[in-house]
Image (cartoon, rainbow, N blue to C red):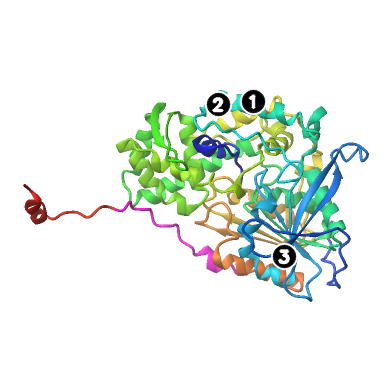
Amino acid sequence: MLRIPRRGLARATLLSALVLLAVQALPVQAAPSPTAALKPCRIAGIPTELQCGSLQRPLDPARPDGVKIDVHYLVVPAMARNKQPDAVLMLAGGPGQSAVSLAARVLPRFARLNNRRDLVFIDQRGTGQSAPLQCPEDRDDDAPVDNDSQMRRLDACRAALEQLPYGRDGGMRFFTTTIAMQDMDAVREALAIPQWDLIGGSYGTRAALEYLRLFPTKVRRTVIDGVAPPDMVLPVSFSPDTQAALDALLQAYGKTHPDLRADWDKLRASVPRQVTVAQPLTGKPETITLDHSLLMRLLRLPLYQPALAAALPAALHAAAQEGRFESLFGLSTSFASSPSTRLAAGMHFSVVCAEDGPRIAQASDRPGADYGRMDAELYERVCKTWPRGAVAANFYKIPPAPSPVLLLSGGADPVTPPRHAQRVAQALGAGHPERVQHVVVPEAGHGVMGLGCMRDLLFRFIDAKTDAEALPQDAACAIRIPRPTAYAPVQGPQKTPAAKKEAAP
């Protein structure tokens, strides 16, 4: 997901600001013995013993004798003894998520794949235990969340990270997607894996596309879910994409909540204002200034998941008509409650400032009416001083797919809607359209591979013995999934007139 973590309400609201050569697959062969040293390990949330390892890599690829970092990874061995040689590589989102931290959360989705294939989770450089670029934890739950305060905190974060052994002398310039994918291939070689089956979500789709571009013969199948292509210019596209998702929600639920648009207009016109709410994680009352920027960010996070977005009509009504903001803040804070979704903010900015920052001024996307340029302006300010790595011109070009690629999109996704995957599918399918399929689930949000029947589709795609059998896949089961019914607050028991008369003194 494309967002930044912070503590308490401040963390929740900032979360949404930050918010990826044509040859056939190699023939199946006996799996070679791994050359990397793997040790038994335990991961929180997973009851069985797994295997962990690390690989030393140069911070700067051009200076192999310079500063070194350790890239850590987790291997979930296949259940069957006679396993397939191709392993599944999970590419995390963000940018800034730890793939290892996500393992417990996503393993149930890929149980069938794990029967005959190893699952591999690599903490991309800058995340998890791989030379993390994590801002020092902010323990001040009452911290203000205005843009100037955000900038001061991020400036302090940058200064702290620049004191790390791998952050000194511009070290954060070497955390780009391209260099990170070179790490991924080095791990593949160390594990003696002939080919990956790539599965990437959100920013992980950009990573998958870059790996596919750099190492086309080392990929057997690719699944990219919530496509964030390299030419997307993330801080600019946030605005029109989130605006479109918000407008669609107001229209969809306006049929059952005829006052929804009026509630939204009233709430929007009421800011800036002081509001006091109970901190959703601690219950501690907090008073903050709710301005337009903060309001828009509060709305963005629930839009990621239709099940949460279904509660927005009631939350907007409570805020606009009754001055109660607990529901609105609570919906956003639900995203910050899981450690597995937290981002390494330093890695996030190192990637985005290098790959998207230089293109902000030339981006063609028009700002949304409500969201405007607030995200672009924040990133422009941060990237002025953030160490910026070099990015090759070819990074932004997507060559034809060398092997089958399955693209997945949620029609209600506020950050990576289908329009981005459509142009990626066209580029990948140039010359060989049969190698590419784009599945759109109209009423789904950010990420669709976890939907019940999509798990089976994904398994069939990767498990197919030949490329011809891999595509196309039948996705009718997911396409028919409806938008969730709007949440209706539970009302207390109503007394009848007779009961009221009987209860009167």
Residue 272, position as x, y percentages in the image: 42, 26
Which one is earlier in the sequence, the residue at label 1 or at label 2?
2
> 384 left or right of 108?
right
Q: Is residue 150 visible?
A: yes
User: SS of the residue at dot 2?
Assistant: helix
Residue at the image point whose x is 66% and y is 57% from the top: 103
Which one is earlier in the sequence, the residue at label 2 or at label 3?
2
> 380 left or right of 288?
right
The residue that mark 2 highlights is: 147
- Say whether marks 1 and 2 touch (CB < 8 Å): yes
The residue that mark 1 highlights is: 381
Front position among marks 3 and 1: 1
Residue at the image point whose x is 39% and y is 27% from the top: 274
Magenta range: 474-490
Quadrant of res 450: bottom right
The residue that mark 3 highlights is: 434
Which one is earlier in the sequence, the residue at label 3 or at label 1?
1
Q: Main secondary structure of the magenta part?
A: loop
